[in-house]
Amino acid sequence: MDDGKPTEPKAKWWSRPTPGRSTRTAPQESSPVEDAVPLVDAGAVRDGAGAEPTRSVAPEAVPQAARPLHEPDQYSTPPYGGPGPWAPAPPVQRPVPTPAHGTPVPPPYAGTNGAGTTAAAAKPPAPAAAFPPPLPQQSQPPLPQHSPPQQHPQPQPPAPQWLQYDPWGAPRQPLITNSGPPLGPDGGRRRNRRGPVLVGALLLALVAGGIGGGMGAYIERNGGLTQVELPQDERNLGGRAPDSVAGIAASALPSVVTLHVSGSTESGTGTGFVLDARGHILTNNHVVAPAGSSGEITVTFSGGETASAEVVGKDSGYDLAVVKVSGVSGLKPLPLGNSDNVQVGDPVVAIGAPFDLSNTVTSGIISAKDRPITAGGEKGDGSDISYVDALQTDAPINPGNSGGPLVDTDAHVIGINSAIRAADSGSTTEGGQAGSIGLGFAIPINQGRRVAEELINTGKATHPVIGVTLDMKYTGDGAKVGQKGADGKSSVAPDGPGAKAGIQPGDVITEVDGRRVHSGEELIVKIRSHRPGDRLELKLTRGGKDLSMTLTLGSATGT
């Protein structure tokens, strides 16, 4: 483009390639006369004003280098018609709005024109009546064959003023702004209605907030808008098999009672069960022992009824006692089973009041039979020691279970819960506070039945005896007959069951009815598990010799 510098020789343009030529040659520089007279067709051409036709030149006079590759385009379509692809683009014209008469026009917007400078600083606005500046002359290549006729510039109307608009520039303000509120149809100011709208919105928000708060409080207090009902199995499962733990407990509980005993120096709690409709109740001797001769015993039934009771008879050697309640009707005796038919592994249920928790039911099995245990001995003279050939069970038994029934799957009593094995103090009755470790012991009901009958009928119980004094300090295997008795007499009572069978002082009894005996306590337990008058088969050693003999048990009262 022409930048206003002095005109120098024009740049040379390379001609288009012609067929059969591989190199380009520079065309001859045209003279100023040739530049002023364009080449046209052989036909006459008139301009739009009816001027005379311009001078024509024969085609053969046109140099080969200036001849176009295509025929002239009658529509003057680039690149073969004017103005050609090398014509400079006209400058962007930005119109200035023509305001109504009397309306003030704001100054041009001082925004950026996309190049970082303001429009006002880039170019001052031109007068409305000014013509656009002429385009600078540019050197142009030779025109193919013909050029449009020269035309004289005609006067143009005043060009509108254009703003520097750049579609890629920063956002701008609108072209026409008007300060203040919009004008109404009548030319006055519009009424400001924003205040009432805001007040209405505020009132609506307050009402909605109040309703929402009330609903939230209601939901929080009532657990929801509707009542929640959880699904539940509606099948009737109230019945239980009679031999299940629940069935056994339902059958036996009405016959089980809780005893509260208080004496002058001590008190205690235990369990018992009804023997007959006359009000006899069987329990342990160590349960009623705190009452002494003037204490008080209160019986509480499973339904919560209470009654006073008195001791009918007791025996410390068997650790059994019978009490009786008066004026009570509707008693349900608990059936008695046969402890000789019990097998190891049979399921059992223990019922009692451990730690004064009445009507407690636990279950287990028979862990062992004929387990010799001794309990008591607090007095020191041996009068309160009980010898029991017990049933062992793993049904949990705790202090307060003493005297309660141990029943089988038919809800029949097979034992009287009496002792537990404590973890720290060995075998003990339940007068202490030791807890269950799964080693509980019950007096077989066959022995308890015989003793209970004697206590009810005579007030006393008889003990089977063999009429000998044992050496309790003997540490060997078996029960050794002492050399002398407690009073200095012979250890074998004259005319007693032992003397009649042939037992002599120093003999060691090793078996009773085919079962081994390992100590004196165990021999007493084996003997007391029988009735007076029963016959026993004994084996013993004397001077290294084994002997066998038959003995008929005698009877004694007291401990």
Image (spheres, helix red, strand yellow):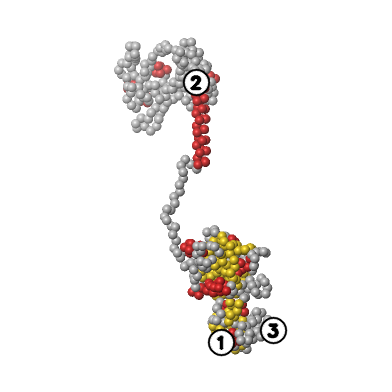
Q: Image quadrant for the C terminus?
A: bottom right
The residue lying toward the viewer, choosing from 448 and 472, is: 448
Rendering coords of residue 22 (x, y %)? 38, 33
Position in image of residue 433 (x %, y %): 63, 64
> What's the residue type where badge 1 is placed?
Met
How many numbered tags mark residues here? Answer: 3
Identify the secondary structure beneath mark 1.
strand
Quarter of the image holding residue 53? top left
Viewed as shown, does residue 338 lie left or right of 55? right
Q: Is residue 184 above or below residue 233?
A: above
Residue 193 circle label: 2
Name the disc covering residue 513, or none: none
SS at circle 3: loop
User: For numbered disc 2, what is the local secondary structure?
Assistant: loop
Q: Amino acid at mark 2?
A: Arg
Sequence-wise, the earlier of marks 1 and 2 is 2
At a point 45% along the width and 48% down the height, the residue shown is: 230
Dot placed on the residue nearer the N-terminal end, 2 or 3? 2
Tell me the mark number nearer the camera, choosing from 2 and 3: 3
- State how far apart marks 1 and 2 are (Cα): 128 Å
Which residue occupies the foreground of this view, 207 or 78?
207
Q: Residue 549's mark?
A: 1
Q: Give the labeled residue for mark 3.
A: 488
Q: Earlier in the sequence, mark 3 or mark 1?
A: 3
Whole-percent x, y for residue 365 in the image: 51, 68
In space, the residues marked 3 and 1 are separated at their CA atoms by 27 Å
The nearer-to-camera label among 3 and 1 is 3
On the image, the x and y values in percent for residue 71 come to: 32, 25
Whole-number angstrom distance, CA of label 2 to CA of label 3: 130 Å
Residue 379 can be seen in this image: yes
